Image (cartoon, rainbow, N blue to C red):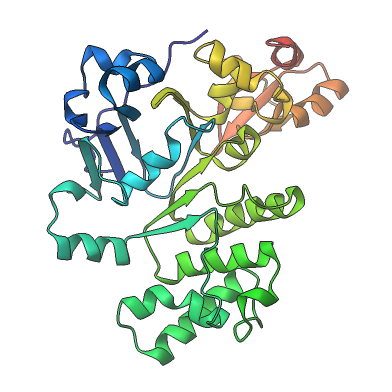
Amino acid sequence: MADAQTHVQDSPTGVPGTDASVACRGLWKVYGANGKKIVGSPDAELPRAELLAKTGCVVAVRDVSFEVAPGEVFVVMGLSGSGKSTLVRMINRLHDPTAGQIRIDGEDLLELPPDRLREVRRRKISMVFQHFGLLPHRRIVDNVAFGLEVQGIERENRERKAVEVLEVVGLGGWAQHYPDELSGGMQQRVGLARALATDPEIMLFDEPFSALDPLIRRDMQDEVIRLQREVRKTMIFITHDLAEALKLGDRIAIMKDGRFVQVGTPEEVVAHPADDYVADFTKDVPRAHVLTARAIMRPANGQAPADGPTVAPETIVQDLIAIVAETDRTIRVIDDGAVVGVVDRAAVMAALVEGS
């Protein structure tokens, strides 16, 4: 299996985080008295129960580093207690880290004066929680406009913006209703609209759909994908559901015991799990629905056929099956008009068999 991909790529500028929307370095969160003494110490490696008994401390997040590019959907996935919710809540300083650095568009959040931190929270970052947190005595339009009200935007302008955003999330016509008149899925759409209304650069999602019925949950996942195509926000999405992570993420971080075990694209995580823990998560994933032509192609090396079938790099293996079933010719993988690789029947069959 591949080595765990826990490193963070160097910034092209040479200054960590300067070209990223979000850049975190060496983040720790230790609960308990004298938590700073645990950071980087041998005790930090103790099993949770032993550490608690010895020191009275619990390590929720340990030495996590990553960057999220502008417009990227970065999914953090892990079981309950893995530290994923603590991590996302440190990004906007709902929880302060015990150690480490958090940069938003190059600004170190831990060094900001209170007034600038409030400004960043109000204008750059929004958050969608699992529990909708709607104000029951306020109309939907007022719930959506709440962040704009906090910013001091006058009523007419904030209501106009709220109505526009309600249209975007498919709730046009519901502005004058109250939360208890809406279904759970509709209420979560209000939560999405509220997060979008302030036009933030960065959206944080803390398991927002885990309380919804499966069909509504799937609809909301599709809604996030649609919104991302339209508004291109930087998103950090927390989930315990691998299928949700694979569906939504440009990259996925698998988290265990406060650490990132592996960071990679959905294809990388499924095709090359870093260890047995990740492999156990991905063993039941239908590879044909995740792996793409880019993942299984080989270099053309000037040997690509002049004609015949062509596919895009993003074509999933499931769609390649139908093509190789009809022809034994080599398939050219075309990206931006150029041949970037080739795929044949043997490669498709190997992708289906490997890991089964």
**Residue 158 screen position, x and y as percent:** 42, 83
Is 69 placed left or right of 290 in the picture? left
Task: Identify which residue is drawn at 44% across, 55% down.
Answer: 233
190 relative to 44, above or below: below
**Residue 227 screen position, x and y as percent:** 56, 59
Quadrant in which residue 88 is drawn: top left
The single residue placed furthest to the right in the displayed view is: 326
The single residue placed furthest to the bottom in the displayed view is: 156
Image quadrant where one finds the C terminus: top right
233 relative to 313, above or below: below
Task: Identify which residue is drawn at 53% across, 65% down.
Answer: 191
**Residue 317 screen position, x and y as percent:** 72, 26
Res. 269 in view = yes
The single residue placed furthest to the top in the displayed view is: 1
Quadrant in which residue 220 is drawn: bottom right
**Residue 117 screen position, x and y as percent:** 21, 59
Is 330 placed left or right of 40 in the picture? right
| Between 46 and 247, the one nearer to me in the picture | 46
